[in-house]
């Protein structure tokens, strides 16, 4: 399960970081705004975008945290490796 989430988080994080993802988000918002008059700017019309953006934000939080944890681990491993190499050079 952990490996599946790691792969999903990596792939989804990569996809959400592209310019295409930004374009899709802009198109969705523009389509929602254009549809306003058809729905007479009702509460339901507003609720759709509010719920949609809340769900996307909530899920992206977990993807961003997974990416941050992965990057932090990689940085710490590299720093440990560099420190060991420096200590070895000073001893030898």
Image (cartoon, rainbow, N blue to C red):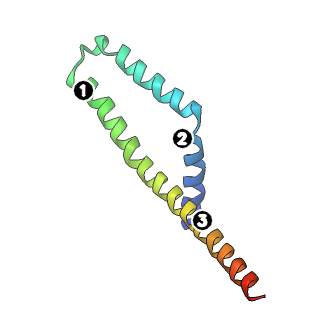
Observer-side mark, 2 or 1, equals: 2
Indicate which label's residue lies in the foreground, 3 or 2: 3
Mark number displayed over residue 75: 3
Q: Residue furthest front?
A: 90
What residue sits right under mark 1 in the picture? 44
The answer to which of marks 1 and 3 sits earlier in the sequence is: 1
Q: Mark 1 or mark 3: which is in front?
A: 3
- Residue 1 visible, this orientation: no
- The image position of residue 61, as x and y in percent, is 41, 51
Percent x, y for residue 56?
A: 40, 41
Q: Mark 2 = which residue?
A: 16
Q: Position of residue 50 (x, y in %)?
A: 30, 33
Q: Residues within 10 Å of mark 2 (few under 14, many from 20)?
A: some
> Mark 2 and mark 1: span between their CA atoms?
27 Å
Q: Hey, which residue is sitting farthest top in the picture?
A: 37
**Mark pair 1, 3: CA separation:** 46 Å
**Residue at figure coordinates x 60%, y 65% from the top left:** 75
Q: Tell me where residue 37 appears, x and y as whole percent.
A: 29, 11
Q: Quadrant of residue 18?
A: top right
Whether 18 is drawn above or below 35: the answer is: below
Q: Quadrant of the C terminus?
A: bottom right
């Amino acid at each position: 399960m952990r490996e599946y989430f790691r792969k999903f988080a990596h792939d989804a994080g990569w996809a959400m970081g592209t310019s295409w993802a930004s374009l899709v988000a802009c198109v969705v918002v523009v389509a929602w705004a254009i549809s306003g008059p058809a729905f007479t700017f009702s509460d339901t019309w507003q609720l759709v975008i509010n719920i949609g953006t809340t769900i996307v934000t909530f899920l992206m939080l977990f993807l961003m945290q997974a990416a941050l944890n992965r990057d932090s681990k990689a940085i710490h491993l590299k720093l440990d490796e560099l420190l060991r190499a420096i200590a070895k050079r000073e001893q030898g």
